Image (cartoon, coloured by chain):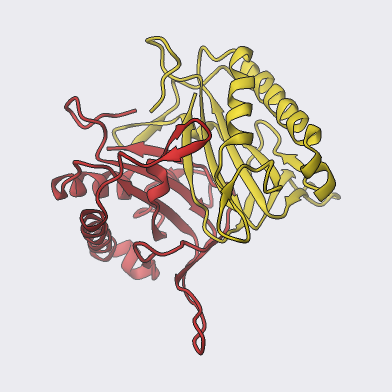
Chain colours: A yellow, B red
Amino acid sequence: MAMAGSNRGPSARVLLQQCLRARLQVKPAEPGSEAEWVEIQRGLIIYVCFFKGASEEIIPKIVDTLVNVKLSETEGGKYVSILDLPGSILIIPQATLGGKVKGRSMQYHSNVEKEIGMELYSQFVTQCERELSANTKCAESGAVLKHGTYGNRQVLKVDTNGPFTHVIEF
Amino acid sequence: MAMAGSNRGPSARVLLQQCLRARLQVKPAEPGSEAEWVEIQRGLIIYVCFFKGASEEIIPKIVDTLVNVKLSETEGGKYVSILDLPGSILIIPQATLGGKVKGRSMQYHSNVEKEIGMELYSQFVTQCERELSANTKCAESGAVLKHGTYGNRQVLKVDTNGPFTHVIEF
């Protein structure tokens, strides 16, 4: 998989799945209050995990790739970018993507420190939002960006017409 | 990520997600016949993609890792293997996992040839089935193994309590 241009490992691993509808819990139920959910219709689910050594300079490149790569299927069966579809985006922080098998367990030693990861995640969401809202097609079609809460359990329900799963490293 | 012990790239890439329920279309609707689906309840979704150079010798190792790695959460919040949960397994062939970004498109040049991939997939399913049915806990609890049809569009609906997504290469 793609390396970050040095001997270091990658800065981020991203998993992409296409959906017809996806719902993600952003606040668990508590005594006296129901769980809160966000929802998108047709669009792209982005699961993201940052590795140790990742810095904010990498984020514009990741965002540019993800919003422009042609992985979204039109009604006519052609593949276009999520901006050209136009479709919505659901971003899910997913630290488990950084896991490596060690015996019968997974280890996460390459994952970024939690506070830095939270800051990178926040910037990643902001820059994706900016791309989506700057795009006329998306704005006119009512495409939205929703995202999970860093550190939460990502309770997720997905309907697809084929997840068309891709992994990209940066 | 793990290499196959030589300078060659990996033989397979596997994506794991936990589910509470998952439904996969195994035959599309046709005039006069409805679509056919398979379904599992609580368990493990295994998306699998084989690369060029993969051979059947690698399959026992992949299967052994996947059925024994402790990624399935018990009611008590402990992580155990899918055999120990005990839970069901849904296997999905997912050639897109072998994609690499090239400009704004994905390329799949590392993917195994289709006929070999079909044979490896078939053996992978058979060996997973064998592990599940040889396990007393799974047999007694009614855990099942279901799988997608190689080459089909993998229309999928998933409910999770957190997908807890992992990527493993072999």
User: Quick check: A113 above or below A14?
Assistant: above
Give the residue displayed 29% in from the left and 29% down from the top.
Answer: B2
| Closest to the observer, B13 or A139 | A139
- Residue A125 x, y percent position in the rendering: 71, 29
Give the residue displayed 35% in from the left and 50% down from the top.
Answer: B48
B136 vs A100, left or right, is left
| Closest to the observer, B16 or A58 | A58
Figure quadrant of the C terminus of chain B = top left
Give the residue displayed 20% in from the left and 49% down from the top.
Answer: B59
| Closest to the observer, A135 or B163 | A135
- Residue A90 x, y percent position in the rendering: 68, 43
Q: How many marks?
A: 0
- Residue B107 x, y percent position in the rendering: 40, 39
Q: Is residue B74 visible in the rendered structure shown here?
A: no
User: Quick check: B110 above or below B160?
Assistant: above
User: Quick check: B33 above or below B167?
Assistant: below
Quadrant of residue A9 in the image? top left
A133 vs A161, left or right, is right
Give the residue displayed 38% in from the left and 28% down from the top.
Answer: A1
Quadrant of residue B158 in the image? bottom right
Q: Is residue B100 visible in the rendered structure shown here?
A: yes
Figure quadrant of the N terminus of chain B = top left
Q: Residue furthest left?
A: B57
| Closest to the observer, A38 or A28 | A38
Q: Residue furthest bottom?
A: B32
- Residue B77 x, y percent position in the rendering: 53, 44
